[in-house]
Image (cartoon, rainbow, N blue to C red):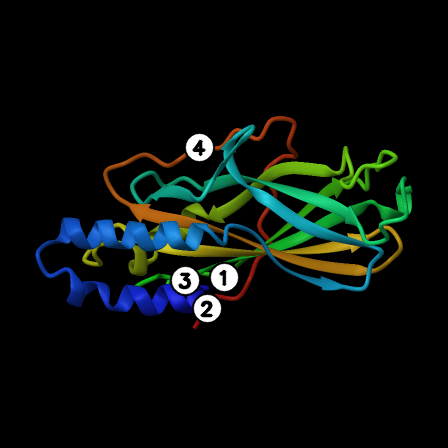
Amino acid sequence: MTRMVTALARHVPRLHRSGVVRRHAALLAIAALLASCEGGSGQSGSAFVFITVDGFSLASGSFTATVNSSIDTGTTTVACVTLRNNLKNPTVTAGTALDNVTIQSYTVTLTSVTGGRLPGPFVFGTAVLVPAGTVATGAINSTNNTATFPVILVPASAKLDPSVRPPNQLPIIAPAEITFRVHAGRGNSVQTDGAVTVVFETGQPDDTASCAGAAPTPTPVPTPTPT
């Protein structure tokens, strides 16, 4: 999907030569297309459970497809993510503590829809428990098997990167792919992916996130400077 959106975006300047406003509108439409892929997009691992991404939000109970990231503020751009722990065996009606999982780290990779380099990828360590929950008799879905917590999409230091500042034309629309690395209670490793669109802009405030009952914002794990 990201490759398709990038290819579409490269045609925008030729299709909309009448002005920046129309080009901006076209890019936002492309972002909306990408948003249809928002949420869980991949799963790997050999655990007894699988993890899915319900979605990203700025406030409890309302998922969003885009998050604004102001280059003026010098602050970190954060969103809330809701992960769901799913039992692979449909005949199991109650998970055990061994089916609980811990999110150990996540990686954020930004890709501009118009091409070009963006800062990152960024790796963050965390420790968030996602319980296995239970399945009632005759039900399909588990309950009490989610966790909502904050994730850093753009560190404050990344907003100083020349690739997201003038003279580059703003706003810059950047799909953010987030890969979560998970440790299951039985010792297996699990990995899952989700995506949300980041909009770098100037003259506007950062979107702020309120993740009710969430874990503290994680501490970044140092990574080598990209070349």
Q: Identify the mark nearer the N-term, 1 or 4.
A: 1
Distance, label 3 to label 1, CA atoms, is 10 Å
Which marked residue is nearer to the observer: mark 4 or mark 2?
4
Percent position of residue 216, x then y = 62, 35
Q: Amino acid at mark 3?
A: Thr
Residue bearing the label numbered 3: 111
Quadrant containing the C terminus in the rendered view: bottom left
Whether the residues at callouts 2 and 3 have beta carbons within 8 Å, the answer is no
Q: Amino acid at mark 2?
A: Pro
Q: Identify the mark nearer the N-term, 4 or 2.
A: 4
Q: Amino acid at mark 4?
A: Thr
Which marked residue is nearer to the observer: mark 1 or mark 2?
1
**Quick check: 53 above or below 120?**
above
Could you say which disc has been placed on residue 121 in the image? 1
Could one spot residue 116 in this view of the protein?
no
Percent position of residue 220, x then y = 57, 50
Distance, label 4 to label 2, CA atoms, is 27 Å
Whether the residues at callouts 1 and 2 have beta carbons within 8 Å, the answer is yes
Residue bearing the label numbered 4: 208
Could one spot residue 74 in this view of the protein?
yes
Judging depth in this view, the residue of 31 and 220 nearest the camera is 31
Tell me what residue is drawn at x 71 percent, y 38 percent. Answer: 146
Q: Amino acid at mark 1?
A: Pro
Which picture quadrant has residue 151? top right
Q: For this view, does 130 lie left or right of residue 14?
A: right
Q: Identify the mark nearer the N-term, 1 or 2.
A: 1
Residue bearing the label numbered 2: 226
Density class for disc 3 (Cα within 10 Å; few <14, some 14-19, many ≥20) is many
Percent position of residue 112, x then y = 36, 61
Q: For this view, does 54 lie left or right of residue 17?
A: right
